[in-house]
Image (spheres, rainbow, N blue to C red):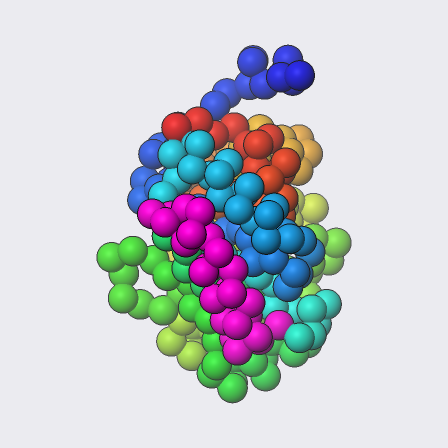
Amino acid sequence: MFPLFRLFRRQYRCRELLPDAQDTHCHLVPQVDDGIRSCADGLHLIGEMRACGLRGCICTPHISLRFPHNNPDTLREHFLRFAVQAAAEHPHFRLQLSAEYMLDERFPRLLRGGDLLPWPVPGDSRRHLLVEMPTGFIPAGWTDTLGDILSHGYIPVLAHPERYHRHLGAEDFRRLWQMGIRFQGNIGSLVGLYGAPARELCLRMLREKLYSRWGSDAHHPRAFRKLPLKS
Ligand SMILES: [Fe+2]
């Protein structure tokens, strides 16, 4: 049954939030993190994305201590295997591989090692890196780590900053923006899928034009269907 509350909720046009028709953040590669579990579910998720008018997505599996086997080589292997199957069913849907890096104890070593999966930004040749933090606490020295990313020649893009509302506010993010940090918002935050305080911060950051790009952060086709997105 169609949930009644969706009838009254604001819907955003795909081209309004995602002008290049690409989802910039999703966990579509099967069996590498807490996202999609099977190839069938992955193909289903692409179908949901296409129904909203998307023409591609950037797959951003977690690279963190929680998923110790994930590195650029293992992720490329899983990604390519899935991409072959996806191309058979959705031949015009563009898949790109990047990652969502957790700012944990291991991250500085990965940064120094240099073998990273950048986050592609159309029309911008500078290298970007999509990063996240735990939502329960802010890691010590996190702003220094963001500065280290900049000094290694990457533009840090903090994923879903609105989800850190317990510890950080719009003023903090405005200061980070001035340092050269960029922000990717989760579409679900716009309608409160992560709670009212995250929604409030998200709408404020939207008004202040602090978001560079939006993404679904979808881990499952069901989660994508809940987004306030229409073609
Ligand atoms: Fe994510």
Q: Residue at x 50, y 51 (%)?
A: 25
Q: Is residue 110 left or right of residue 58?
A: right
Q: Residue at x 48, y 56 (%)?
A: 85
Q: Is residue 9 above or below residue 110?
A: above
Q: Is residue 30 visible?
A: yes
Percent coordinates x, y for residue 53 in the rendering: 38, 34
Percent coordinates x, y for residue 91 in the rendering: 36, 49
Q: Is residue 209 above or below residue 176?
A: above
Q: Residue at x 39, y 39 (%)?
A: 54
Percent coordinates x, y for residue 215 in the rendering: 48, 45
Q: Is residue 104 visible?
A: no
Tell me which segment is drawn in magenta: 70-93
Q: Residue at x 69, y 74 (%)?
A: 68
Mark count: 0
| Residue 82 belongs to magenta span | yes
Q: Is residue 109 above or below residue 158?
A: below
Q: Main secondary structure of the magenta part?
A: helix
Q: Quadrant of the N terminus?
A: top right
